[in-house]
Image (cartoon, helix red, strand yellow):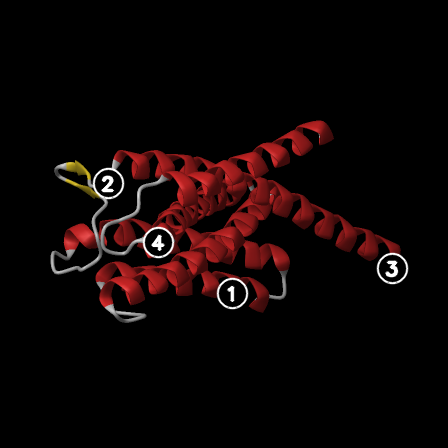
């Protein structure tokens, strides 16, 4: 099993190197924003990973409530942490984009506002988890909260369609993908690379959480 983990880590590293190469040396420069547009690939890919992470948290939370198996709670917790991390990256890169594109670090555009709400929802998820002393009870509360909190994900996705006054750019419109072919190729590879990175981080975080639980159990057994 260890050899597969090593191979996957090197594959992830290789995919990230390829993605960085395409971003900085292959993708065509945008006419107006020039080099600043490169942040687009990190911004969109981090949003995709955040959505994926919260979807896994959503599914794992349902499975935990149904099966009452700690492995699903570990998966939900680990995926949620990564989701918050990439939502933070998404908000930061979005702010940098906004400064170059709109002349301000922040605007209460529907897509930006709903993404910020999403960040607060899942930060509160971890505050709730840490505020309940009894671990199993806390896990069940968080599972229910995680399921309900996921409702903001489709709202974030649909924000630029439901609120027509949005100034957030639309990569995909009724006429197709509004990007140069080199940008499309780069975005696809970056999506794949970030997905590999996500599953690498998720596997590592789940393993770490399992070791922490085993250590706590060992300490409890030792001092009985």
Residues packed near mark 3 inside 10 Å, few (<14), some (14 to 19) or many (20 plus)? few
Q: Residues at badges 3 and 1 in contact (C-beta under 8 Å)?
A: no
The residue tagged 3 is 223
Compared with residue 17, is residue 111 higher up or lower down, i.e. above or below?
Answer: below
Residue 48, given in percent of the width and then of the height, sits at 38, 45
User: How would you rate the neighbour count of disc 2 (Cα within 10 Å): few for under 14, some for 14-19, many for 20 or more?
Assistant: some
Q: What is the quadrant of the C terminus in the image?
A: bottom right
* Image coordinates for residue 149, horizontal then vertical, percent: 38, 56
- In the image, taking residue 186 as reference, residue 138 lies left or right, namely right
**In this image, 3 relative to 146: left or right?**
right
Find the distance from the CA under tag 4 to the CA under tag 3: 59 Å
> Where residue 128 is drawn, which disc sits there?
1
Frontmost of labels 4 and 1 is: 4
User: Could you say which quadrant of the image residue 22 lies in?
Assistant: top left
- The numbered mark, 1 or 2, whose residue comes first in the sequence reads 1
Instruction: Check the picture and name the quadrant holding the N terminus.
Output: top right
Q: Which numbered tag is attached to residue 35?
A: 4
Left or right: where 99 falls relative to 60 = left
**Helix or strand or loop: what does disc 4 sit on?**
helix
């Amino acid at each position: 099993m260890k050899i597969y983990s090593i191979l996957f880590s090197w594959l992830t590293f290789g995919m990230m190197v390829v993605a960085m190469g395409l971003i900085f040396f292959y993708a065509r420069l945008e006419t107006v924003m020039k080099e600043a547009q490169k942040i687009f690939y990190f911004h969109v890919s981090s949003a995709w990973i955040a959505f994926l992470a919260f979807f896994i948290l959503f599914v794992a939370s349902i499975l935990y409530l149904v099966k009452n198996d700690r492995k699903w709670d570990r998966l939900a917790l680990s995926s949620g942490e990564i989701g918050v991390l990439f939502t933070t990256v998404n908000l930061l890169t979005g702010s940098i984009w906004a400064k170059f594109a709109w002349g301000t670090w922040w605007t209460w555009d529907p897509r930006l506002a709903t993404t910020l709400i999403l960040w607060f929802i899942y930060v509160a998820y971890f505050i709730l988890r840490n505020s309940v002393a009894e671990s199993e009870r806390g896990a069940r509360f968080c599972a229910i909260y995680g399921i309900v909190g996921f409702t903001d994900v489709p709202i974030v996705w649909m924000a630029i369609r439901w609120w027509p006054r949005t100034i957030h750019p639309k990569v995909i419109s009724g006429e197709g993908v509004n990007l140069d072919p080199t940008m499309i190729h780069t975005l696809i590879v970056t999506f794949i690379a970030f997905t590999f990175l996500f599953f690498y981080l998720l596997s590592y975080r789940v393993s770490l959480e399992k070791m922490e639980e085993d250590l706590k159990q060992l300490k409890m057994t030792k001092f009985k």
